[in-house]
Amino acid sequence: MSDAGPRGEPAKRDAVPHSVQNVHASGDGSVAIGVMNGGAVFHQAAAPARSAAGRRIRILMLAANPEPTARLALDVEAREINEKLRLAQDRDGFDLITRWAVRPDDLLQGLNEHRPHIVHFSGHGTSAGEIMLAGAGGGQQPVAAEALAAVFRATVDNVRVVVLNACYSAVQAEAIGRHVDCIVGMRAPIHDRSAAIFAAAFYSALGFGRSVRQAFDQGVAALMLNGMPDHDVPELVVRAGADADRPV
């Protein structure tokens, strides 16, 4: 990952897709993992994680790195999240959807189109509590906390978790916390590498059936294991009456 430094000041790169070769699904949900004596050898897949309605859990990753902000390795972060989910016990229960160079209008479009259960924003934040999106005509467009809160108030039907992987996003987290059960924000600048380490550990834990609070704690633990000095920057906000101690 690049040494771009803190996420507080972002040109886009596409995440590297992963593929699994020589694996074939059968009609009963088992997976062919090889051939023996001319026939396929099947292994019964683990039961996938499901939302309350029995659907796959959709994660919508929104990334923005507009000019002239410092370049971030957002594609690497997306790849590491994807890799951790691919290796998780409940890997078949999650869909990771990525959107790049996100503009303000893309927020409502993405939430309406994909109806995600988890929304993950990666990019820059400001000390005023804004996140930086791409401008319609180029450049950057700051989005205030109250504007982002209004977006989630209007689209809260499916969203249970929001992760704001950007500097100073704790202000946004507090605003969104009136409408969404669990929000992760950053109370200070966080280094680019730290943001990716935290995200990878957080989604790995969810992929193994851990609760949101446990996933948050594992993200912090991963930062400490890697000797990152900003391990105390992530913050979990839980809406009154919500339960962060159960799986998504």
Image (tube, helix red, strand yellow):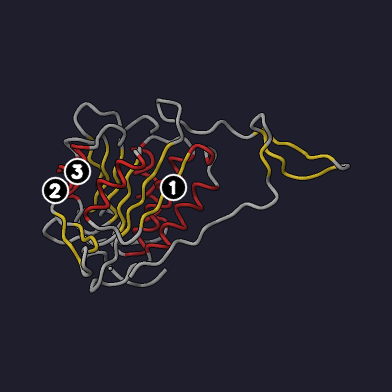
Is there a contact, CB below 8 Å, between mark 2 and mark 1?
Answer: no
* Residue in the image at 30% along x and 70% along y: 5
Instruction: From the top left corner, tell me how far across and down residue 235 is, in percent.
Output: 25, 47
Disc 2 to disc 3, C-alpha distance: 6 Å
Please tell me how crowded label 3 is: few (under 14), some (14-19), or many (20+) other residues with Cα within 10 Å: some
Is there a contact, CB below 8 Å, between mark 2 and mark 3?
Answer: yes
- Looking at the rendered image, the quarter that the C terminus falls into is top left
SS at badge 1: strand
Name the residue carrying label 2.
147
Q: Is residue 53 left or right of residue 119?
A: right
Query: How many discs appear?
Result: 3
- Looking at the rendered image, the quarter that the N terminus falls into is bottom left
Please tell me how crowded label 2 is: few (under 14), some (14-19), or many (20+) other residues with Cα within 10 Å: some
Name the residue carrying label 1.
96
Instruction: From the top left corner, tell me how far across and down residue 211 is, in percent.
Output: 38, 34
Q: Is residue 23 left or right of residue 160?
A: right
Q: Is residue 151 left or right of residue 44?
A: left
SS at badge 2: helix
> Which is nearer the N-term, disc 1 or disc 3?
1
- Residue 32 drawn above or below residue 130: above
Name the residue carrying label 3.
151
